[in-house]
């Protein structure tokens, strides 16, 4: 459900960017009480996917790849803003995105330590493809997860 809200907010942002924020869009925006940004949903989306994995592995093939995809995308966007920050000042939304990326990564770090390690095995290709992730905190957590997987499941990692 939260994932659908996040996708809808992202779609609305893209539509606004495509129209260039014309005056009719501005009038419509004032008529709605709620006009959230997609970044407002990211933390909840990731936490709900993590909760679904914590309480059962029935939907691991749906929840884990989606959790990682959202996390990687937010981290990549925050890394792009960090590179931009060195050249010019960031907007409030970009600063918020960087904070959300750091907070989500910290939450996932504690989540990864509580989740049984074998649950991460189906996501091994996805983790190894992002080994050189541009966001430093995300990359460090990926390295840690891969190290723990290789240490505890060397045969499975070798054949993945």
Image: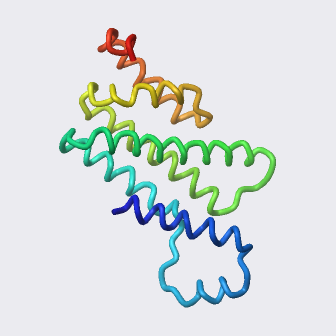
Judging depth in this view, the residue of 16 and 40 nearest the camera is 16
Judging depth in this view, the residue of 107 and 38 nearest the camera is 38
Question: In the picture, residue 30 is in which quadrant?
Answer: bottom right
Q: Is residue 91 above or below residue 119?
A: below
Q: Position of residue 49 (x, y in %)?
A: 32, 49
Q: Is residue 38 left or right of residue 52?
A: right
Q: As drawn, which residue projects farthest toward the right?
A: 87
Q: Is residue 156 above or below residue 29?
A: above
Judging depth in this view, the residue of 65 and 112 nearest the camera is 65
Q: Is residue 97 above or below residue 83?
A: below
Going 51% across and 67% down the picture, which residue do you hit? 9
Q: How is the image coloured?
A: rainbow
Q: Position of residue 103 (x, y in %)?
A: 46, 48
Judging depth in this view, the residue of 46 and 59 nearest the camera is 59
Q: Position of residue 6 (x, y in %)?
A: 46, 62
Quadrant location of the N terminus? bottom left
Going 42% across and 21% down the picture, which residue do you hit? 146
Q: Is residue 71 above or below residue 94?
A: above
Going 32% across and 9% down the picture, which residue do you hit? 155
Quadrant location of the C terminus? top left
Q: Is residue 40 left or right of residue 16?
A: left
Total marks placed = 0
Going 30% across and 31% down the picture, which residue do you hit? 113
Q: Is residue 112 left or right of residue 77?
A: left
Q: Position of residue 55 (x, y in %)?
A: 19, 44
Q: Is residue 16 left or right of residue 106?
A: right
């Amino acid at each position: 459900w939260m994932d659908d809200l996040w996708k809808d907010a992202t779609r609305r942002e893209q539509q606004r960017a495509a129209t260039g924020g014309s005056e009719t869009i501005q009038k419509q925006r004032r008529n709605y009480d709620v006009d959230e940004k997609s970044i407002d949903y990211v933390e909840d989306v990731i936490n709900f996917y993590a909760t679904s994995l914590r309480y059962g592995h029935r939907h691991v093939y749906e929840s884990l790849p989606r959790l990682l995809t959202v996390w990687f995308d937010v981290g990549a966007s925050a890394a792009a803003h960090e590179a931009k920050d060195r050249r010019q000042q960031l907007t409030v939304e970009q600063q918020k995105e960087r904070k959300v990326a750091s907070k989500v990564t910290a939450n996932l770090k504690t989540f990864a330590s509580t989740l049984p390690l074998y649950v991460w095995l189906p996501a091994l290709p996805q983790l190894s493809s992002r080994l050189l992730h541009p966001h430093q905190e995300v990359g460090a957590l990926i390295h840690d997860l891969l190290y723990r997987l290789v240490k505890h499941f060397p045969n499975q990692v070798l054949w993945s």
